[in-house]
Image: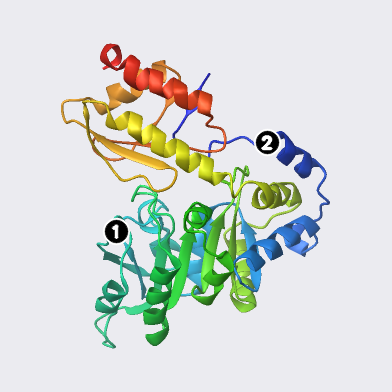
Amino acid sequence: MIIDLRSDTVTQPTPAMREAMMAAPLGDDVYGEDPTVQAMEEKTARMFGMQAGLFCASGTMTNQIAIRVQTQPGDEVICDRLAHIYNYEGGGIAVNALASVRLLHGERGRFTPADVLENINPEDIHYPTTRLVALENTVNKGGGCYYTLPQIAAISEVCQQNNLSLHLDGARVFNALVETGEDPTQYGRYFDSISVCLSKGLGAPVGSVLVGSRDLIRKARKVRKLMGGGWRQAGLLAAAGIHALDHHIQRLKDDHRRAIELAGMVGKLPFVENIIPVETNIVIFRLDAAIDLDGFIRQLSEQNIRVSAFGKGQIRMVTHLDFTDAMLERMNEVLSVKAGSLY
């Protein structure tokens, strides 16, 4: 039994998802003729109270397209220093949008309306024009913490008052929503664009959807094309997304429960210095300085357990569709019963 906790992107399509993929009607999406892609884009947009959607290969692509179409060269994007769009998208804001970034120092990646207000540049030829604010829900480097709708609404109000666009990197937005119980259609009231990932907790093999106004998505479709992101018979993948949206949202609570239990096991180990509070499906902990990080990962690998290094002395484990209770029990055996012999 291999236990892969490196990410929630490692899941395999379920048998029911594979059946849906094989049954999907197909067409050439560049010509606007794939009915399954269209259905999935429309479905996702409706779920978030938006007018239209655009299916893309990844969350990085949807994020970068959203930034590109809502900024001009020389503009500035406000985000947290832990944000995925800044840390893990290859410098795409600089390359794709020719924009600069103002980094905020929020609490585990979440910042406040006051933080935004204090970092809007004045109208002065010496400064870039502040144009876009980007949130992340849930925050990957923040251990899966999340914004609530009231927090989002307050930031949105500052953006509207200052003529700023508001984007959401919703890589794990459904993980946040199943915890808060909030209505995703309300998101459309506050965001100008939202990236919705299908290939993490929802278990689809590939893809994210950018949702927004019809005009924004029209512009986004052109940018997707120039990035080389035009699909052909992509309905196979879109069908997996539809199945995931229909069947895999509420089950995210199981991932969260297992993450909390996993954190409890990790917390009992004498060589763990601290654990970031677990709110959804991400467990991040720091090893004691005396413990060799690479050696720790290697010894887990020898037990068929895969985890990720996540900065100096830190480990990340992410629960997901393919991580079962039996695997959780195996983790307990390795981390506690055999802890002495392993480490």
| Residue farthest toward the left in the current orientation of the protein | 290
Residue 34 visible in the picture: no
Label 1 neighbourhood size at 10 Å, few (<14), some (14-19), many (20+)? some
Residue 131: image quadrant is bottom left
53 shown above or below 122: above
From the viewer's side, name the closer residue of 286 and 33.
Answer: 286
Q: Amino acid at mark 2?
A: Thr
Q: Amino acid at mark 1?
A: Arg
Disc 1 secondary structure class: loop
From the viewer's side, name the closer residue of 66 and 140.
Answer: 140
From the viewer's side, name the closer residue of 238 and 278.
Answer: 278
x 29%, y 88%: residue: 123
Asked if the residue under mark 1 is in contact with the one under mark 2, i.e. CB atoms within 8 Å, the reply is no
x 74%, y 38%: residue: 16
* Position in image of residue 94 (x %, y %): 38, 63
Residue 40 visible in the picture: yes
- Tell me, what colour scheme is on the image? rainbow
Label 2 neighbourhood size at 10 Å, few (<14), some (14-19), many (20+)? some
* Position in image of residue 247 (x %, y %): 67, 47
x 23%, y 25%: residue: 292
x 41%, y 64%: residue: 135
Residue 77: image quadrant is bottom left
Q: Earlier in the sequence, mark 2 or mark 1?
A: 2
Residue tagged by mark 1? 81
Residue 103: image quadrant is bottom left
Residue tagged by mark 2? 14
* Position in image of residue 42 (x %, y %): 70, 65
Separation of marks 2 and 1 at Cα, in angstroms? 36 Å
* Position in image of residue 289 (x %, y %): 16, 31
From the viewer's perspective, is the residue at label 2 or at label 1 nearer? 2
